[in-house]
Amino acid sequence: MVAFVLALGTLVLGGEAPRIDLADWPVRIGGEAQLFADDFLVARGERIEYALHRPEKHPANPLVTPAPSVERLVLAYGSVIREKEGGPFRLWYTNDTGIAYAESADGVRWEKPAVGIARDGRPTNILTRGHRGRSDTLTVFLNPDASDIERKYLAYVFEYRFPDRDGVREERREGLYLRASPDGIAWRERPEPVMYSMWRNPADRPAGTEGDLGDVHHVSWDPKLGKFMGHVKLSLGGVRKRGLTESDDGIHWSHPRLILEADERDRPGDQTYSMIAFPYESVWLAYVGLYHKGTDDRMDIQLAVSRDGRNWSRPLRGAFLANGPAGAFDWGVLHMAANPPIRVGDALWIYYGGYDTVHGTKLPDVRQFGIGLSMLRPDGFVSVDARGTPGSLVTRPLCFEGGKLAVNASIGAGGSLAVAVLDRSYRPLEGYRREDCAPLSGDGLGLPVRWKTTNTLPPAGEERHVRLQFFLADASLYSFRIE
């Protein structure tokens, strides 16, 4: 992994909004990993830095490329699903015909089974045709209603309507269509879009509305809210921004509201082009495609974070997934697959796609397309680091039910990590001082924290909150967990 480090003073929780001092506000946490993707949990920090970590790209990339005589392009507009550990990997992507399918036993070597539309009398891996030549962005995921076996898989796909391109007015409206399948192979489509687009059809704009709903979408499920969350492209004043719309049934959606846009901390001309958002442990994370319009016209991937799935920020700028070198399939434009990271052993597998020319190039003129794989340490998106000079951080007052504390950390050969437990007024509790903690060393995803007389944290309920103070020396702290 490659890390990019920013000092604590440059970490902005909201970016555009005034900061609220949350240092003394209690927060209830569960048994999920508590990440430091932002400073939501941090009350005080001394001599620490926040490091953004890039996943490592697989050396065999691109893993999926166009099949000769069947497709000219492959785009990671789609999803990879692995339903159980040890099970097969399934990929739905878009090509120059529509939605195509591939599968893999190991997630690296992919096959394109002939289970779809016939071409020249022979079946292909193409499952559906696009309404007007090809489909665009695609999200495939398992129906949260597991009892609906005929709709086990849901797919949201953007379909175009080019008005009068060939003298025939397309009857089906442009927008986001919902498809369902019992097996991921045979799909049935609702006849009308669940979200309409006015991008290419200004005459279709509803009265009293402004701005355009663009083509690059993503849909995810929020298990806490019990809602579908739609992350859509908005065009306001000709500038691409990201909006959020919500739905109880996946069919009827709220009016989108603006949640992310480029600002003065980005390059001049930058636009937020795409957004793949998902709940991960205790937070929501999102891969944001940042289009560097007017500078190099390429697109890389940055990281955004939310604590509720509705309010978003980009505390650490810079590429989370960077463009490849000149001549590589991912030199020009990057798009992330529409699924959360897949845990495989001690790594998160993150699929993405790319092509080797700048944005705005007509797709028939692109030389290389591909879908690749990158890998990241679990919880390894951002770490709190102390290098050279020892540092520390103190959390906000915490309320929790568990008693065992473990940390995901990497500690240098001469470094250490220790934890003290404080009351709300920052006073160390007896038996939980720094000197009582057995110093941690090494590298581990769940290093247990112990003190001289106990291996268990003191109770921290609604009537009593505690803070954790982490002391770091030549160490990176990715997350902690209380169970």
Image: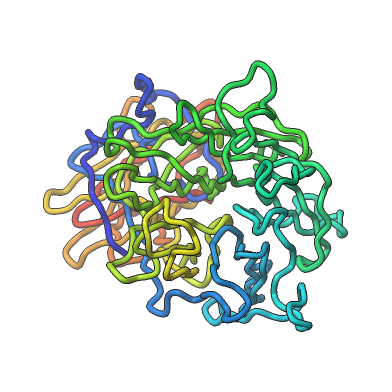
Asked if residue 362 lies left or right of residue 14, the reply is: right
Work out whether residue 453 can be spotted: no
The location of residue 335, given as percent across then percent down, is 47, 56
Residue shown at the point (75%, 46%) measured from the top left: 168
The colour scheme of the drawn protein is rainbow
| 153 or 49, nearer to the observer | 153
Asked if residue 151 lies left or right of residue 420, the reply is: right
The location of residue 29, given as percent across then percent down, is 52, 39
User: Where on the picture, by quarter, is residue 467?
Assistant: top left
| 343 or 373, nearer to the observer | 373
Residue shown at the point (60%, 46%) measured from the top left: 218
Image quarter (top left, top right, bottom left or bottom right) of the N terminus: bottom left
Asked if residue 270 lies left or right of residue 278, the reply is: left
Work out whether residue 243 can be spotted: yes
Q: Residue furthest front?
A: 167
The location of residue 179, given as percent across then percent down, is 77, 53
For the image, the number of numbered tags is 0
| 84 or 365, nearer to the observer | 365
User: Where on the picture, by quarter, is residue 90?
Assistant: bottom right
In the figure, 139 relative to 26: above or below? below
Residue shown at the point (63%, 40%) measured from the top left: 230
Q: Residue furthest left?
A: 388
User: Where on the picture, by quarter, is residue 15?
Assistant: top left
The location of residue 472, given as percent across then percent down, is 24, 50
| 94 or 254, nearer to the observer | 94
Residue shown at the point (61%, 29%) measured from the top left: 256
Asked if residue 354 lies left or right of residue 297, the reply is: right
Q: Residue furthest top?
A: 208
